[in-house]
Structures are given as C-alpha cells and as structure tokens.
Image: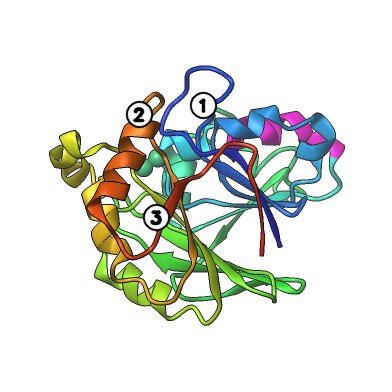
Amino acid sequence: MRLKVLGCSGGIGGPEARTTAFLADDDMLIDCGTGVGDLALEELAAIDHIFVTHSHMDHIAAIPLIVDAVGEMRGAPITVYAIPEVLRILRAHVFNWLIWPDFTAIPDRRRPFLRMQPIKVGEEIRLGDRSITPLPALHSVPAVAYCLDGGTGQLVYSGDTTYSPELVTAINACRDLRHLIIESAFPDEQHGLALASRHLSPTMVAAFLDEIAGNPQVHISHIKPGQGERVMAQIAAAGARLHASALRQGQVIEF
Ligand SMILES: [Zn+2]
Ligand SMILES: [Zn+2]
C-alpha cells in the first residue's frame, strides 16, 4: 500500500500547513482535511472511499467540497466510512441543506453522489487485497484510529486521541506493524490543554510509545504550525524507546 501525506498539520497557514488527510493508493482518503484541496480534479474524481476518524472540522473540511466538485463526473457514489455517531453528526450538522446540500439525496436517493457506510471498532473492511480496521481512540468527540493493511505490512494512524490503554492494546495486537502515525497536538507547555481537549503532548507521546511493542517507524502528526521543532525536541528529550520523526506533508510511506 502507498500512503501519501496530503496534510498533517494541526492548523492552516501557508502551503506547508494543510490539515489532516492521507491518500491511500489512488482511490482512498484517510481523513479529509484541507490537504485534499491540493489534488487535481482527475485525482479527486478517482476517490471512491473516504475513511473518517472523527467529526472535527480539520479532518472533514474537504468532504462537502470533493462531493460537489466530482459528483457529476463519477458513475458511482463516494462512500464515507465512519462510526455511526460520526455519521449522525455529519448528517445533522454538515449535509443538512443549511451548511451544505444533502448529497446522499442528490441527484436522487437511489443513485446519490455520496453514501454513508457505518463501521464498527475492530471490524475489518476489505477492499480488494487491502484491509482497513477501525481501532478505539479517545478524543473529545467519538473517534477511531485506523489500521491499514496492504498484505505486506501494516500502518496504524491514531487520528486525534489522548492516551488510551485500549488503543495501546489494539496497536500491540497488530501482527505486522511497520509504521505508526501518532499525534502530538500541543507542546508540553500546554499539557493541561492537551489533557482537557483529549489530545497528546510530547511527554504523553513518549509514555504511549514506551508501551508499544515491536519496532514500527513512528511519525508525529497534527503539530501546530510553527511548533514543529519545539514539539520534536520535547519528544526526543522525553527519551522514549522508539525514535520518532515529524511527519511531512508530501511524504510517501510504502508498506
Ligand atoms: Zn479532533
Ligand atoms: Zn484534529
């Protein structure tokens, strides 16, 4: 599987700071933040599947726009996969005819531009020879992490989460983990804010990593613009067993 980082920043501000979105192969998005806006129209039209971790704006901002941009060009709906709580929020607060039209009824309910597919934590979704499994995450709103498996190795993306023993257990149950993308939304100076908003700080990332078995490559995402060096220095100073590097927009991970 091939994962391209379209955005991995905790906020916007210039061409190097797009919010979270990953392009898996050519047809799948994992989260749908502002990074998706850099894809060409033909690349957008090739997206069949969008897997969403949670409903926060920085992870869903481009869903309404991509459906509107390519709906008529495609012969089949785009499918958004998320846990039922997240789909309910998208229906009630985004595709409600007020913020955006309900594209699950356009042009009609039998052949819509958008489908919503509920998923369950721990239940694998198979797409050809690839699989994607939602794992339990712990955030201020209902949220999941994802394990992606291309048949020759696995990658786990935490989404937005704070420390969660259930997530540690789920990650350690992955049989062939090669890469772990984990967030650090705040520097240690804002540890209290990280706890309150159910994110991770560098000290918490290091403690999290010390419970991860095996030797996956660790990539840090969701750092606020301008705080990358400080956050990475704090993670290094915390001295976790696993080395971590900052995930970069444009980076491609093959596994
Ligand atoms: Zn969030
Ligand atoms: Zn976020």
Q: Secondary structure at mark 2?
A: loop
Q: Which mark is residue 17?
A: 1
Q: Is residue 171 above or below residue 198?
A: below
Count neighbours of disc 1 (C-alpha within 10 A) and say few if under 14, some if 14 to 19, many if 20 or more.
Answer: many
In the image, residue 94 lies at what x, y percent? 49, 34
Q: Which residues are magenta?
A: 62-73
Q: Main secondary structure of the magenta part?
A: helix
- Marks 1 and 2 sit apart, C-alpha to C-alpha, by 12 Å
Residue that sits furthest to the left in the current view: 192
Kind of residue indicated by mark 3: Glu
- Residue that numbered label 3 is attached to: 85
Q: Is residue 218 above or below residue 69?
A: below
Q: Which mark is residue 54?
A: none
Q: Nearer the viewer, residue 186 or 116?
A: 186
* 211 to the left or right of 153: left
Residue 251: in magenta span:
no
Image point 41% across, 26% down: which residue?
Answer: 225
Question: In the image, which is nearer the foreground, mark 3 or mark 1?
Answer: 1
Q: Nearer the viewer, residue 51 or 108?
A: 51
* 53 to the left or right of 178: left
Q: Secondary structure at mark 1?
A: loop
Count neighbours of disc 2 (C-alpha within 10 A) and say few if under 14, some if 14 to 19, many if 20 or more.
Answer: few
Question: In the image, which is nearer the foreground, mark 1 or mark 2?
Answer: 2
- Residue that numbered label 2 is attached to: 227
